[in-house]
Image (cartoon, rainbow, N blue to C red):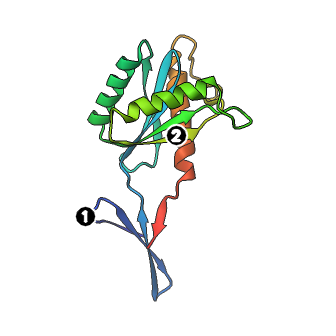
Amino acid sequence: MHYKANPHRSIQLFVLLGRSACETHILRDPGRILSIDYGEKRVGLAITDPLAITARGFQTLINKDRIGILTALVDIISSNEIKKIVIGIPYSLDGSIGQMAERVKKFSEELSTKTDVEIEEWPEEYSSEDAKIELRKLGVDFRKDKGKVDRMAAALILRSYLNAQPLTESL
């Protein structure tokens, strides 16, 4: 396999198929994606690498007031060259929209008025509980720093989103 960057920052992946055939794929390069796990006390953030392949916990913001959170997010979006935002929506198990999902959707709408970056809502159920399980597996003590759970939850939301996206696009 040979990798060659094109002028659009995409990567062309050439895969030789025998001696006479060559198939070209474009590895998607949307830039960094920011994931948000919105909570009433804390807002967990995760971010991808520049090629949007891997996800990692990034920051936890204390949710004291909505304006402060929105301002902090606008700064983070700008300083990290975020190209897309994925916000976890905690739908009920039956798929309905509960009170918390409504709050998150309202927050998503408010954020969309503060930035031109595309915001995609992504279903998430029990991301905080799943984050605790993952942190326990890693031997991480999160009892004194609940922000670790929020960052991990945001990373799990982002990982779920990335896993659902095709990595390449055939030409």
Answer left or right for 57 relative to 68. right
Q: Could you tell me which residue is drawn at 42 percent across and 48 percent down?
A: 52
Q: Which residue is mark 2?
A: 121
Type of the residue with mark 2 = Glu
Front residue of 148/37: it is 37
Circle on res. 7:
1
Vertical comparison of 63 with 24: above or below: above
User: At which x and y percent is residue 97?
Assistant: 64, 32
At horizontal 41% and vertical 14% (from top left) the residue drawn is 65
Q: Quadrant of the C terminus?
A: bottom left
Identity of the amino acid at label 1? Answer: Pro
Of pointers 2 and 1, the one earlier in the residue sequence: 1
Residue 29 seen from this side: yes
* Quarter that holds the N terminus: bottom left
Q: Quadrant of residue 76?
A: top left
Considering the numbered disc 2 on the image, is that residue within a helix, a strand or a loop? Answer: strand
Q: Nearer the viewer, residue 31 or 94?
A: 94
